Image (tube, rainbow, N blue to C red):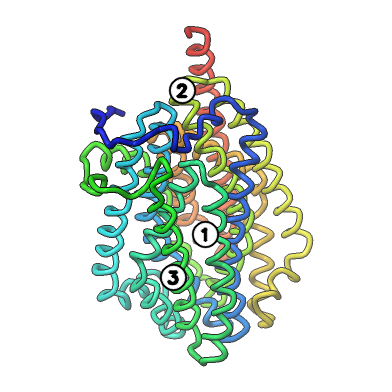
Amino acid sequence: MRNFAPVKLNIDMSQQRVPTALGTEKISKLLMQYAIPSIIAMTASSLYNMVDSIFIGQGVGAMAISGIAITFPLMNITAAFGSLVGVGASTLTSVKLGQRDYDTARRVLGNVFVLNILLGAMLTLVTLPLLNPILYFFGASDNTLPYARDYMQIILIGNIITHLYFGLNALLRSSGHPEKAMYATIGTVLVNTILDPIFIFGLDMGIRGAAIATVIAQSLALMWQIKLFSNKNELLHFQKGIFKLKKRIVFDSLAIGLSPFLMNLASCVVVILINNALVTHGGDYAIGAYGLVNRLVFVSIMVVMGFNQGMQPIAGYNYGARRYDRVTQVFKLTVMWATGVTTFATILCMGIPDILVRIFTTDEELIRISVKAMRIILLVFPVVGFQMVTGNFFQSIGMASKAIFLSLTRQLIFLLPCILILPHYFGENGVWYSMPISDAIATIVAAIMLWQQFQIFKKQQVDQ
């Protein structure tokens, strides 16, 4: 990535907090320092979604859970555009800090703010008028459409807020404030948990109340983030001259963020196909079961993502500083912990699936289908931790093309053919088995690519 010519902003660097410890501190200590706040934040984020589902399932009904499951593709699309800017910019910020190019790092902050507003507004204006046909395309039936529509109308209206909230949180982590990013996420969970029962039950707003609680919680967190980035004593802060979009910053941010963008977009395509296959072979209850399993598995996935977010600034900084030994070390440690998380989640879900599902619903048919689906989907789930970390690793060091390819292997290249073929022979079970099969093949591909990259690191380390 090309550097910009420095702009004189008259900043006294002695007053700024520069995270140089990323290149000197012990890797295990750094990973815990950055990962634990991220893990807490990401776990809180997964609970945030789970709280919505619990209140909706217990307060509105089983069909409302299926309605929420229908919104997953559209939620993935909004998340895709958010990650396109936020993840790419946070990685670019880490690399620029490692290169001590602080002027560009500041400009990244301003560009992220503007891009999130533009993309968030564009997505709302395009999808809101076409919401009904979009949801039908995603697998909604006449029974589930009213719930899905009522929820997504509110979420889309607050889409700009959501984009800014996630984008600024990513930059908080990359600029040396993982604990503040954690506080922002925990704050949204607490506010949402308090407001959910008030709006759903107290004000009798049903599923729309859950959506309103979500938007309000993110709005409060965003106000706090803006206050933090307005502090002139911080290295990265809002100031005149950084909000003008720069072609190179926009291009580099979007290029790096293209991997998680395509991953979310591929996930959207896959969920659409899964929903339609489940409607054909299992009905609305099968879609609800898929939604419940997703909510439960999402907790462990978010913990792994927390480790990935902890790894990202460490790997990015040291890659920019050409410390390949430290880059390798942080990757290996992250893989070890991530695999432990997915293994524990598998044991737990295989051991007491019915107890976990009953947290969301008392409907016996929905419970039966959910338990069966969970036991099939998680057959090879322990290896998913390794695959996720590997994809994020390439993204963290700016190798966007490799990260994109790995994202597509698990989400699209291997899973898509399975979903299109297996249900014709095995019905509903064919949909469930598609997921562990694609996970296993994608992990093998990730291991091969990773081995090749480590060989390059070894050669570069010797040549230094």
Q: What residue sits right under mark 1 in the picture?
A: 184
* Quarter occupied by residue 443: top right
Of the numbered discs 2 and 1, the one sitting upstream in the chain is 1
Residue 410 percent across, percent down from the top left: 49, 45
Query: What is the quadrant of the N terminus in the image?
Result: top left
Question: For numbered disc 1, what is the local secondary structure?
Answer: helix
Question: For numbered disc 3, what is the local secondary structure?
Answer: loop
Tell me the mark number nearer the camera, choosing from 2 and 3. 2
Task: Rate crowding at label 1 as few (under 14), some (14 to 19) or many (20 or more) other CA atoms within 10 Å.
Answer: many
Hey, what amino acid is under mark 3?
A: Thr
- Counting the numbered discs, the total is 3
354 is higher (above) or lower (below) than 18: below
Task: Rate crowding at label 3 as few (under 14), some (14 to 19) or many (20 or more) other CA atoms within 10 Å.
Answer: many
Hey, what amino acid is under mark 1?
A: Ala
Task: Rate crowding at label 2 as few (under 14), some (14 to 19) or many (20 or more) other CA atoms within 10 Å.
Answer: some
Looking at the image, which residue sits at the far top?
463
Using the image as rendered, state which of residue 350 and residue 5 is in the foreground.
5
Question: For numbered disc 2, what is the local secondary structure?
Answer: loop
Q: What residue sits right under mark 2 in the picture?
A: 321
Residue 374 percent across, percent down from the top left: 66, 62
Residue 136 percent across, percent down from the top left: 36, 75
CA gap, disc 3 to disc 1? 25 Å
Q: Which mark is residue 71?
A: 3
* Quarter occupied by residue 335: top right
Q: Residue at point 61% right, 57% down?
A: 43
Tell me the mark number nearer the camera, choosing from 3 and 1. 1
